[in-house]
Image (tube, rainbow, N blue to C red):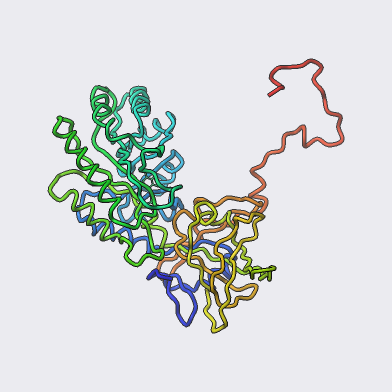
Amino acid sequence: MQCLDFQRRNGNLFAEHIAIADIAKTVGTPFYCYSATALIRRYQAFKHGLDRESALIAFAVKANSNVAVLKRLAHEGAGADIVSAGELHRALLAGIPAGKVVFSGVGKTNEEIAFALSAGIFQFNVESAEELDRINLVAADCSTSAPISLRVNPDIEAGGHSKISTGRAQDKFGIAQADIPSLAARASHMQHVDLLGLDVHIGSQITSPKPFKDAFSKLRGLADQLRRAGYPISRLDFGGGLGVGGTSRNALDIAEYCALVRAMTVDTDYHITVEPGRSIAAEAGILVSRVISTKKGAERTFLILDAGMNDLMRPALYDARHDIEPVTLASRAEEPVDIVGPVCETGDTFARQTKLQRLHAGELIAFANAGAYGAVLSNEYNSRPLIPEVLVEKGRWAIIRARPSYDEMSGRDLVPSWIGIEHEKAVVAPTLDATSLH
Ligand SMILES: *Cc1c(COP(=O)(O)O)cnc(C)c1O
């Protein structure tokens, strides 16, 4: 593990002061395990890196929305970048002040806009002319004014996976630069929106400085242009998207990323917002699983785990790679294996032909960098209950989401009475009723 807070002692993996094997004994496998110290370390790296007391570090809730995680970050002063009313609900529940919440996303419903207005959020990041009109109308209904920023689509190829690129002209996100001035004019004539800033977010898992530099300078240029035209632009939101770890040695780190933001703002009084998700949470979490068995296939050896693609979707969804290591190192021969889950899909494959010490059924294995877009993307495919989440801080640990029982999982399904009544003759409506055709 590359992370400071997941270290080995005598070959055994620890989260801070707690042995992973001990947690596994209590909660069973698979489970997610987060280090609070690692989360805070990364949050603080942004805080120090931006070096401006007023800067808002709005954690992207979609990366890890566990309320305990949000609450721990809230204690440090974090805000939230949300993309739904559900995320706003979680953020508020976690004690993040509404005044530190940024509302992003291309599909905000009127109900969600009204909820965010009544909470009193920091800003709406507006995605289109149509959305601008709608926010104005909803705010009028609520007899209030919505603080807004316009999301610029800088038309930049960010270099990450195509499925997580968001800043190209063909992507559904943001407003073309050429349309920004006319949209600003339109907003300035509206009674119920306050245009305060501009924002960008060009994608995720970006590890080189170039796309950020290009996007930031376009953002700054447009903001200055609007200011010169007389609009009171006071805020710049640089989005998220900073990548983590991986193989590239010279990948951008948080300090270097913040230096890019600083360089773009030193000579100005723009208020700064950033929306990091992955770069705060990914390395602060691991997924712990157990070997169910090994299988010698015709051509390959498979290591079959009790964690599947439903628990960690990233490899199946966008070819993400996670370093996978035994929880306890032993001096055994290494062999190339395909690491797979138990789900009935070929896509349920975490790694192909990777070298690993020979492992036996029952032994534990850990996936690195699983703290972001892990638990949040999980589902119950194959009727596998959502797996628990555990938070460690120094010598303490707690379950922060319990493993549901099978009854809890299936209890959400409702069986209508006509299916429930057995051995009774079905009552057939004598005449055809149009409503019954649907
Ligand atoms: C997803 C998202 C983020 C966070 O992205 P990371 O890659 O996790 O840092 C920030 N802002 C917006 C608008 C997003 O959609």
Between 60 and 15, which is closer to the camera in this rendering? 60
Q: How many marks?
A: 0
Residue at 17% x, 35% y is 225
Residue 289, x across and y down, in percent: 57, 66
Residue 428, picture quadrant: top right
Outermost residue, bottom side: 331
Between 414 and 370, which is closer to the camera in this rendering? 370
Placement of the N terminus among the 4 image quadrants: bottom left
Residue at 82% x, 25% y is 427
In the image, residue 194 above or below residue 360: above
Residue 269, x across and y down, in percent: 15, 44
Between 144 and 65, which is closer to the camera in this rendering? 65
Q: Is residue 15 left or right of residue 291?
A: left
Residue at 28% x, 53% y is 210
Q: Is residue 217 left or right of residue 322?
A: left
Outermost residue, top side: 431
Residue 55, x across and y down, in percent: 24, 49
Residue 402, picture quadrant: bottom right
Residue 202, x across and y down, in percent: 34, 46
Q: Is residue 183 left or right of residue 165?
A: left
Residue 245 appears anywhere in the view: yes
Residue 398 appears anywhere in the view: no
Placement of the C terminus among the 4 image quadrants: top right
